[in-house]
Amino acid sequence: MEALDRLDRIKDRFEEEIKKCGDLSRLDGVRTAYLGRKGELTMILRSLSALPDGQKVEVAKQANLLKREFTARIEETRAGLEETEAATKKDKTDVTLPGIRPRAGTVHPITGTISRINEIFISLGFSIAEGPEIETEFYNFGALNIPLEHPSRDAFDTFYIKGEYLLRSHTSNVQVHVMERQKPPVQVIMPGRVYRPDAVDASHSFMFHQVEGLMVDKGVSFSDLKGVLSIFCRSMFGNDIKMRLRPHFFPFTEPSAEVDISCIICEGKGCRVCSGNGWLEILGAGLVNPKVFEAVGYDPSEYSGYAFGMGVERIAMLLYGVEDIRLFFENDIRFLRQLS
């Protein structure tokens, strides 16, 4: 039957063309070509009256089935194309526009200062040791020859938690842990956070950072300590820096000294930063007190050693020219960018 054969040919062409529809405009063209007012399928339905009576019913049935099938296929294809087009518009990137450069982060000045200190001492043969920030009185005071009546053990100078537990007030506690588990020779530095209930101002904070060092072996002398600290000062602040040692007292070292460097601001001439005397105090040091060795099981008649400690914020303030310690902890991105 010629009309039915024509419907088969229309169906085959429709299938080929709808598969090629890659956008809504082309799909509308296919819909018009087959289902529009002058579309191929529409024209067949309009010409049913010209067919013999025996063919009208069958041709009308097949033509209407194709119309429903074509309509469903067109709507299904339209939904897929609209979804794809919406996603494309949402995620579309104009590659002709200049890119947005992401802002790169930088190392915090305190972290950078600690790394710089560590690198210097590692180059001198020291290794890094870490220990607990919550400590007992024995490790924070007793083993370091700090007596019960010492002011630092008062509740106004130490953060006590419960019973004998406290927040360490220096990283010297790590020295005791290291010596308890390791026989000489010992050559370590101990960076970390420490806590003291100081009133916060331009030069004090209740939390700050320290790097302490310890060297224990046979025949270690004060001249060894002076040589190591001299190398550190020149490496940290420049070869033109001068260093001096002033007698001082620390319970855990004997003899003890405060270590000063010539002012890096005025080159020793005297300025506001160095209070006009040309020198800046940067750390404390000395030979390990024999009582500390006895507390950890070392024989003080066989071994000797030195220890030193410095506040990282103090070093960082000198390196970066910062006059207020609080700026390091306020997380003001404008300040941190200036130092990057």
Image: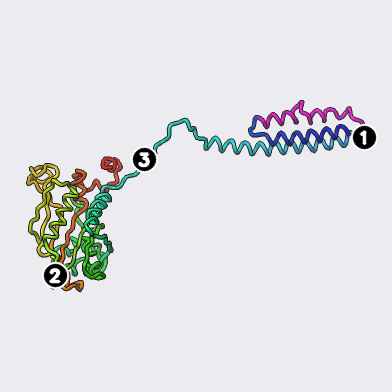
Q: Nearer the viewer, residue 124 or 296?
A: 124
- Relative to 269, is 103 on the left or the right? right
Secondary element at image label 3: loop
Please state which amino acid type lies under the numbered disc 3.
Answer: Arg
**Residue 69 in sight from this viewpoint:** yes
Please state which amino acid type lies under the numbered disc 2.
Answer: Pro
User: Residue 276 in the image: x percent, y percent?
Assistant: 7, 44
Q: Residue at x 54, y 35 (%)?
A: 89
Tell me which segment is drawn in magenta.
Answer: 26-54
Please determine whether, in this image, residue 55 is positioned above or below residue 123: above
User: Residue 135 in the image: x percent, y percent?
Assistant: 26, 66
Mark 1, other Cα within 10 Å: few <14 / some 14–19 / many ≥20: few
Q: Residue at x 88, y 36 (%)?
A: 57
**Residue 210 in sight from this viewpoint:** no
Residue 32 highlighted magenta (yes or no): yes
Please determine whether, in this image, residue 85 is positioned above or below residue 172: above
Q: Main secondary structure of the magenta part?
A: helix
Identify the mark at residue 290; answer none if there is no mark: 2
Secondary element at image label 1: helix
Q: Quadrant of the N terminus?
A: top right
Q: Quadrant of residue 258?
A: bottom left
Residue occupied by mark 3: 103
Give the spatial CA distance, label 1 vs label 2: 123 Å
Residue occupied by mark 1: 54
Q: Nearer the viewer, residue 228 or 83?
A: 228
Q: Quadrant of the C terminus?
A: top left
